[in-house]
Image (tube, grey):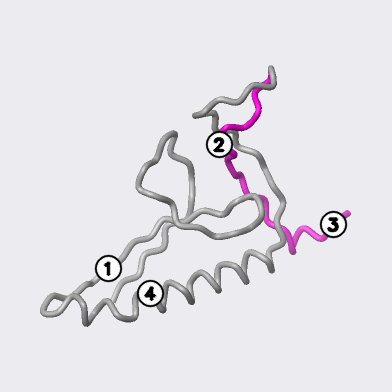
Amino acid sequence: MPDLKNEILVLTSFAGSEMANGSRGLFDNTLVPVKLDAELLKNNLTGFLQSVNQLLSGIPKAMEPFKLDEIELAIEVNGEGNIQLIGGVKVGASGGITLKFKR
């Protein structure tokens, strides 16, 4: 039996997944449970947050004379354990992780 402490179950959607008859639907989003290594997710999230930190580090100067108090990013975990930003269009909105950065 695998050590469940080192795994996390993620429901991920596969757009255009195969339907029962073998055809593919453009807006067919099927949720599939995937077991991912918790250490992999930790490393990927840490790398993502480091990239976001670099991206945001120059924003205060660009915003002068205004002050930016809060930034909210929506991210998701894909079937391989990669972290990615969720775009603005949410057809059949799915769950994700919201990161809120506040001063």
Q: Nearer the viewer, residue 51 or 6?
A: 51
Q: Quadrant of the C terminus?
A: bottom left
Give SS at disc 3.
Answer: loop
The residue pinned by badge 3 equals 2
Give SS at disc 4.
Answer: helix
- The numbered mark, 3 or 4, whose residue comes first in the sequence reads 3
The residue pinned by badge 1 equals 70
Identified at 59% across, 51% down, the residue is: 78
- The numbered mark, 2 or 4, whose residue comes first in the sequence reads 2
Q: State which mark lies toward you, 1 or 2.
A: 2
**Which residue reaches farthest right?**
1
Q: State which mark lies toward you, 3 or 4.
A: 4
Residue 93: image quadrant is top left
For disc 3, the neighbor class at 10 Å (few under 14, some 14 to 19, many from 20) is few
The residue pinned by badge 4 equals 55
Give SS at disc 2.
Answer: strand
**29 shown above or below 73:** above
Q: Would residue 89 appear left or right of 9 to someone viewing this image?
A: left
Q: Are marks 2 and 4 in contact (CB under 8 Å)?
A: no
Where is residue 33? Give x, y as percent: 67, 43
Identified at 55% across, 73% down, the residue is: 47
The magenta stretch is: 1-20
Residue 59: image quadrant is bottom left
Q: Are marks 4 and 1 in contact (CB under 8 Å)?
A: no
Q: State which mark lies toward you, 1 or 3.
A: 1
**Looking at the picture, which amino acid does disc 1 mark?**
Glu
The residue pinned by badge 2 equals 15
- The numbered mark, 1 or 3, whose residue comes first in the sequence reads 3
Q: Nearer the viewer, residue 52 or 99?
A: 52
